[in-house]
Amino acid sequence: NYVGDASWPTALSGLMGTGSTITQMEASIGGYTNNDFLNIKNIYNNNNNSFDNTPLKSNFELFKKTFPMITLIDMDAEGPDTGNYDQDSFVAFCKMLIAPDIGLDITFCPYQNHEFWVNSLQALNGTSNTGPVKWWNLQCYAGGGGNTGTEWAGYITQTIPDFDTNGYIVVS
Protein backbone atom coordinates (compact mmCIF):
# COMPACT_ATOMS: atom_id res chain seq x y z
CA ASN A 1 0.00 0.00 0.00
CA TYR A 2 1.10 3.56 -0.72
CA VAL A 3 2.63 5.16 2.34
CA GLY A 4 3.40 8.86 2.37
CA ASP A 5 1.84 12.14 1.52
CA ALA A 6 -1.37 11.22 -0.30
CA SER A 7 -1.37 14.59 -2.07
CA TRP A 8 1.66 13.72 -4.25
CA PRO A 9 -0.24 11.87 -7.00
CA THR A 10 -2.77 14.69 -7.28
CA ALA A 11 -0.06 17.36 -7.25
CA LEU A 12 1.92 15.61 -9.99
CA SER A 13 -1.18 15.10 -12.12
CA GLY A 14 -1.96 18.79 -11.75
CA LEU A 15 1.34 19.67 -13.40
CA MET A 16 -0.02 18.30 -16.66
CA GLY A 17 -3.35 20.08 -16.45
CA THR A 18 -4.97 22.71 -18.61
CA GLY A 19 -2.53 25.33 -19.82
CA SER A 20 0.54 23.29 -18.94
CA THR A 21 3.25 22.58 -21.49
CA ILE A 22 4.33 19.43 -19.62
CA THR A 23 3.46 16.43 -21.76
CA GLN A 24 5.28 13.63 -19.94
CA MET A 25 6.97 12.91 -16.62
CA GLU A 26 9.96 10.74 -15.91
CA ALA A 27 11.41 9.13 -12.78
CA SER A 28 14.99 7.91 -12.45
CA ILE A 29 16.66 4.81 -11.07
CA GLY A 30 20.34 4.71 -10.24
CA GLY A 31 23.08 7.27 -9.97
CA TYR A 32 26.75 7.29 -9.17
CA THR A 33 26.77 6.75 -5.43
CA ASN A 34 24.12 4.06 -5.09
CA ASN A 35 23.83 0.39 -5.86
CA ASP A 36 20.30 0.26 -7.28
CA PHE A 37 21.36 -1.93 -10.18
CA LEU A 38 23.52 -4.17 -8.02
CA ASN A 39 20.47 -4.72 -5.80
CA ILE A 40 18.33 -5.37 -8.89
CA LYS A 41 20.91 -7.89 -10.09
CA ASN A 42 20.84 -9.67 -6.72
CA ILE A 43 17.02 -9.84 -6.71
CA TYR A 44 17.10 -11.24 -10.26
CA ASN A 45 19.78 -13.83 -9.50
CA ASN A 46 18.20 -14.88 -6.20
CA ASN A 47 14.84 -15.41 -7.92
CA ASN A 48 16.11 -17.83 -10.59
CA ASN A 49 16.83 -15.09 -13.15
CA SER A 50 13.34 -13.63 -12.93
CA PHE A 51 11.47 -10.78 -11.30
CA ASP A 52 8.18 -12.70 -11.15
CA ASN A 53 6.54 -12.67 -7.72
CA THR A 54 9.17 -10.35 -6.23
CA PRO A 55 8.52 -7.29 -4.07
CA LEU A 56 10.42 -5.29 -6.71
CA LYS A 57 7.85 -6.12 -9.37
CA SER A 58 4.85 -5.57 -7.11
CA ASN A 59 6.33 -2.24 -5.95
CA PHE A 60 6.62 -1.04 -9.55
CA GLU A 61 3.07 -2.17 -10.29
CA LEU A 62 1.93 -0.10 -7.32
CA PHE A 63 4.15 2.80 -8.40
CA LYS A 64 2.54 2.87 -11.85
CA LYS A 65 -0.96 2.62 -10.35
CA THR A 66 -0.24 5.41 -7.86
CA PHE A 67 1.61 7.67 -10.31
CA PRO A 68 0.04 7.00 -13.73
CA MET A 69 1.29 10.37 -14.99
CA ILE A 70 4.88 9.06 -14.87
CA THR A 71 5.35 7.23 -18.15
CA LEU A 72 9.14 7.02 -18.41
CA ILE A 73 11.92 5.65 -16.22
CA ASP A 74 15.46 6.94 -16.79
CA MET A 75 18.02 4.16 -16.35
CA ASP A 76 21.15 5.62 -14.76
CA ALA A 77 23.32 2.54 -14.25
CA GLU A 78 26.76 3.74 -13.22
CA GLY A 79 29.04 3.94 -10.27
CA PRO A 80 32.07 2.27 -8.84
CA ASP A 81 30.44 -1.16 -8.43
CA THR A 82 30.78 -3.15 -11.65
CA GLY A 83 27.68 -5.11 -10.63
CA ASN A 84 25.74 -2.06 -11.78
CA TYR A 85 26.55 -3.10 -15.36
CA ASP A 86 25.10 -6.61 -15.41
CA GLN A 87 23.59 -7.00 -18.89
CA ASP A 88 21.23 -9.89 -18.14
CA SER A 89 19.55 -8.41 -15.07
CA PHE A 90 19.49 -4.90 -16.56
CA VAL A 91 17.72 -5.99 -19.75
CA ALA A 92 15.34 -8.24 -17.78
CA PHE A 93 14.54 -5.34 -15.45
CA CYS A 94 13.83 -3.06 -18.41
CA LYS A 95 11.59 -5.75 -19.92
CA MET A 96 9.72 -6.02 -16.62
CA LEU A 97 9.07 -2.27 -16.62
CA ILE A 98 7.88 -2.18 -20.25
CA ALA A 99 5.64 -5.24 -19.97
CA PRO A 100 1.89 -4.46 -20.16
CA ASP A 101 1.24 -5.06 -16.44
CA ILE A 102 3.52 -2.08 -15.63
CA GLY A 103 3.65 -0.37 -19.04
CA LEU A 104 6.46 2.16 -18.75
CA ASP A 105 8.83 3.42 -21.43
CA ILE A 106 12.48 3.97 -20.63
CA THR A 107 15.37 6.26 -21.38
CA PHE A 108 19.06 5.55 -20.85
CA CYS A 109 21.46 7.87 -19.02
CA PRO A 110 24.96 6.65 -20.00
CA TYR A 111 28.32 8.24 -19.30
CA GLN A 112 30.72 5.32 -19.79
CA ASN A 113 30.77 1.64 -20.82
CA HIS A 114 29.28 2.16 -24.28
CA GLU A 115 29.22 -1.58 -25.02
CA PHE A 116 26.82 -2.15 -22.13
CA TRP A 117 24.46 0.61 -23.27
CA VAL A 118 24.51 -0.19 -26.97
CA ASN A 119 24.00 -3.91 -26.36
CA SER A 120 21.13 -3.14 -23.98
CA LEU A 121 19.57 -0.84 -26.59
CA GLN A 122 19.85 -3.55 -29.22
CA ALA A 123 18.32 -6.15 -26.89
CA LEU A 124 15.34 -3.89 -26.19
CA ASN A 125 14.77 -1.89 -29.39
CA GLY A 126 16.28 -4.16 -32.01
CA THR A 127 17.23 -2.04 -35.00
CA SER A 128 14.61 0.69 -34.77
CA ASN A 129 13.84 3.82 -32.79
CA THR A 130 10.27 2.67 -32.08
CA GLY A 131 11.10 0.41 -29.14
CA PRO A 132 10.78 1.13 -25.43
CA VAL A 133 14.09 3.03 -25.14
CA LYS A 134 12.86 6.45 -26.28
CA TRP A 135 16.14 8.39 -26.11
CA TRP A 136 19.47 8.68 -24.33
CA ASN A 137 20.29 11.39 -21.78
CA LEU A 138 24.05 11.38 -22.37
CA GLN A 139 26.00 12.63 -19.38
CA CYS A 140 28.56 15.22 -20.43
CA TYR A 141 29.33 16.46 -16.92
CA ALA A 142 31.43 15.10 -14.04
CA GLY A 143 32.78 11.69 -15.13
CA GLY A 144 31.22 12.10 -18.59
CA GLY A 145 32.83 15.48 -19.20
CA GLY A 146 34.58 14.30 -22.36
CA ASN A 147 31.51 12.68 -23.94
CA THR A 148 30.00 13.95 -27.17
CA GLY A 149 26.73 13.04 -28.82
CA THR A 150 28.56 12.33 -32.08
CA GLU A 151 30.90 9.86 -30.39
CA TRP A 152 28.04 7.97 -28.74
CA ALA A 153 25.94 8.01 -31.92
CA GLY A 154 28.91 6.32 -33.58
CA TYR A 155 28.91 3.61 -30.93
CA ILE A 156 25.25 2.91 -31.68
CA THR A 157 25.60 2.82 -35.46
CA GLN A 158 28.70 0.60 -35.28
CA THR A 159 26.57 -2.10 -33.67
CA ILE A 160 23.13 -1.19 -35.09
CA PRO A 161 23.84 0.31 -38.54
CA ASP A 162 20.20 1.15 -39.40
CA PHE A 163 19.46 2.88 -36.10
CA ASP A 164 18.63 6.56 -36.62
CA THR A 165 20.56 8.50 -33.98
CA ASN A 166 19.45 11.90 -35.29
CA GLY A 167 17.83 13.63 -32.31
CA TYR A 168 18.05 10.43 -30.25
CA ILE A 169 20.88 11.48 -27.95
CA VAL A 170 20.13 14.37 -25.60
CA VAL A 171 23.39 15.87 -24.34
CA SER A 172 23.21 16.99 -20.72
Image (cartoon, helix red, strand yellow):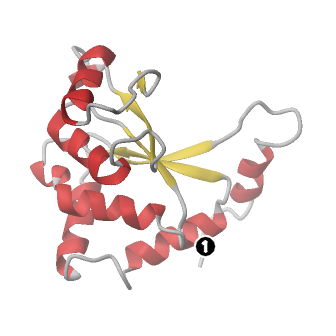
Q: Residue at 24% x, 41% y: name it.
A: 117
Q: Position of residue 36 (x, y in %)?
A: 29, 56
Residue 137 can be seen in this image = yes
- Where residue 114 sits, quadrant-wise, is top left
Which quadrant is home to the N terminus? bottom right
Viewed as shown, does residue 131 lie left or right of 79? right
> 13 or 160, which is in the foreground?
160
* Vertical side of 24 occupied by 52: above or below: below
The quarter of the picture where the C terminus appears is top left
Between 33 and 151, the residue placed more toward the observer is 151
* Residue at horizontal 21 percent and vertical 14 percent from the top: 146
Q: Is residue 84 above or below residue 48?
A: above
Residue tagged 1: 2
Q: Is 154 left or right of 30, judged from the image as shown?
A: left
Q: Amino acid at mark 1?
A: Tyr
Q: In the displayed image of the protein, which residue is found farthest to the left? A: 82
Q: Is residue 39 visible?
A: no
Q: Position of residue 2 (x, y in %)?
A: 61, 73
Q: Whole-percent x and y of residue 157?
A: 26, 28
